[in-house]
Image (tube, helix red, strand yellow):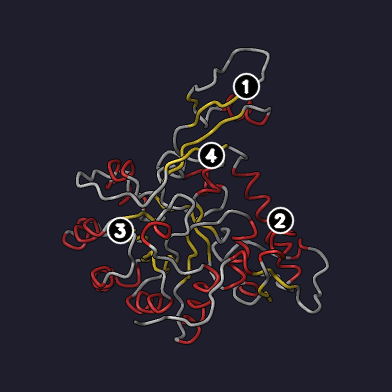
Amino acid sequence: MPCISTQPLFDFNDITIVPHTTTDIISRSECHSYDSTGFLPLYTAPMTSVIDETNAQYFEQAHIHTVLPRTVPFETRILYSEQHYSAFGLQEIESIIAEHTSYPNIRYVLIDIANGHMQKMVDLIKKLKTIYGSTLHIMAGNIANPETYTVLAQAGCSAVRIGIGGGNACSTSANAAVHYPYGSLIVGCREQKERHGLTTDIIADGGMKWFSDIIKALALGADAVMIGSLLNKALESAGKTTVLQWDGTDERYTVGDIVDQFDTVVANDFKQGLKLVKEYYGMSTKRAQKEMGKTDLKTSEGIIKTQSVEYTLAQWTENFHDYLTSTMSYSNARTLPEFIGKANYCLITTHAFNRFHK
């Protein structure tokens, strides 16, 4: 029976960032948290309860890379892919290849499947690159084996989504027993990237519960991080938004009311104490499968739940920027290339993690 590793593998809770021996950075204001395109090293997860065609602009304005989910109409995704990533399933990719003369301007494609280890997907990536060449940027995944990163990179991917079973709305690891601890997976993919001289971005996808998880992912070698649950908690995220509590003097809201989160009155009331909740669900749930037009529904490996709305996108991104640049200052890194995959870290015990992580 093959064993990938006889050494214990680690997750985000098993490590902490260790400061550089000395640093000549005086203030975190000297550090820059934006990539070469002027965006934060973040992507929206292509989830219906995070983003759609009606709110993508808010994420763009917050300098977060966007990916439209497969529940958005096909032609809308095709048009959007001329400037930003859109997600497509395997059958849709086959359709694009067969009718590629009808889609001459696509530039950013995410091949969005649960099992990114399929040879069929590798073959489709090669066909797309043969047709569109260097003008097409392909992101693919998800994977949970460092060697598969190399396979997809060499097939022509610009970015690879890594991580299976760790998402906050995913039950794959609990039910299907498929997973690879995130920390070790990122390090393993980074080692593959450097060993083979690859330029394909590593996108750590799913399961980020804290700002520190995102920062650790970058420190270990992820070029960017894909976010679902944390962005769902932002007022501007997609999906049904419901009133949980209103303590105002008037009776403008009733518990259970569905509100328009983009309405300026609702936004102002939220800042004054209006409590809201949002739906959040994985894209392998039967609900999401139906929204994608599927009739042969598969056993769900996703979770449906509600989450409290805790902040606006502006508040969240400001906090992320401040925490990331603070960590960069400890690591003597003024830019993301100086920080990603280069920060010092050490393994810690569960007791040590619980003591400082409150």
Query: In whole angstroms, how far apart are the C-alphas of marks 1 and 3?
Result: 48 Å
Of the pair 299 and 81, the residue shown nearer to us:
299
Q: Which residue is mark 4?
A: 307
Relative image position of residue 210 (x, y in whole percent): 62, 54
Q: Which residue is mark 2?
A: 322
**Badge 3 element:** loop
Query: In whole angstroms, how far apart are the C-alphas of marks 2 and 3?
Result: 37 Å
Q: Which mark is residue 246?
A: 1
**Badge 4 element:** strand
Of the pair 48 and 289, the residue shown nearer to us:
289
Query: Which dot, 3 or 4, sits closer to the camera?
Result: 4
Residue type at mark 2 is: Asp
Pick whichever of labels 2 and 4 is earlier in the sequence. Answer: 4
- Residue 141 lies left or right of residue 341; in this view the side is left
Q: Which mark is residue 76?
A: none
Pick whichever of labels 1 and 2 is earlier in the sequence. Answer: 1
How many neighbours does mark 1 have within 10 angstroms: few (below 14), some (14-19), or many (20 or more)?
Answer: some
- Give residue 106's quadrant in the image: bottom left
